[in-house]
Image (cartoon, helix red, strand yellow):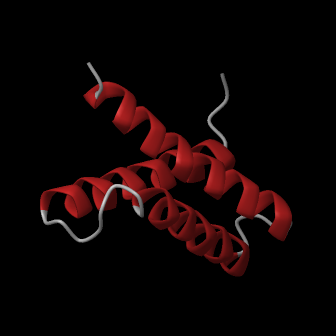
Amino acid sequence: MELTVDIIIAVATAIVTAIFGTLAKKFNWATQDYIPYQNIAIGIIAGILVFATGLNTNILYALILCIFSATAAGGIYDATKTK
């Protein structure tokens, strides 16, 4: 498997989302109802940064990649905490 910029971006977005999600739950920044919106906001910001820095020249692809990574990180976190 080849390590590409897209994979690195997806992993970095997922890590940032997981960190913010953990902090939000630990310090009660937001209720659990708002955490998916927080993840989407992080994905949008990351997508814009990816496009602005030139890592990906297609804005739609950058946004979809980062939003998917951010929401997947939230889903994986919730799946590990569910018994």
Q: Residue furthest left?
A: 27
Q: Is residue 76 above or below residue 51?
A: above
Q: Is residue 40 left or right of residue 63?
A: left
Q: Position of residue 70 (x, y in %)?
A: 53, 52
The residue that appears at 54% across and 70% down in the rendered structure is: 41
Q: Is residue 73 left or right of residue 32?
A: right
Q: Position of residue 60 (x, y in %)?
A: 84, 64
Q: Residue furthest bottom?
A: 52
**Quarter of the rendering containing residue 76:** top left
The residue that appears at 74% across and 55% down in the rendered structure is: 64
Q: Is residue 53 left or right of residue 17?
A: right
Quadrant, the C terminus: top left
Q: Is residue 72 above or below residue 23?
A: above
**Quarter of the rendering containing residue 43:** bottom right
Count of marks overlaid on the render: 0
Q: Is residue 60 left or right of residue 21?
A: right
Q: Is residue 6 above or below residue 61?
A: above
Q: Position of residue 37 (x, y in %)?
A: 51, 64
The residue that appears at 49% across and 60% down in the rendered structure is: 39
Quadrant, the N terminus: top right
Q: Position of residue 10 (x, y in %)?
A: 57, 48
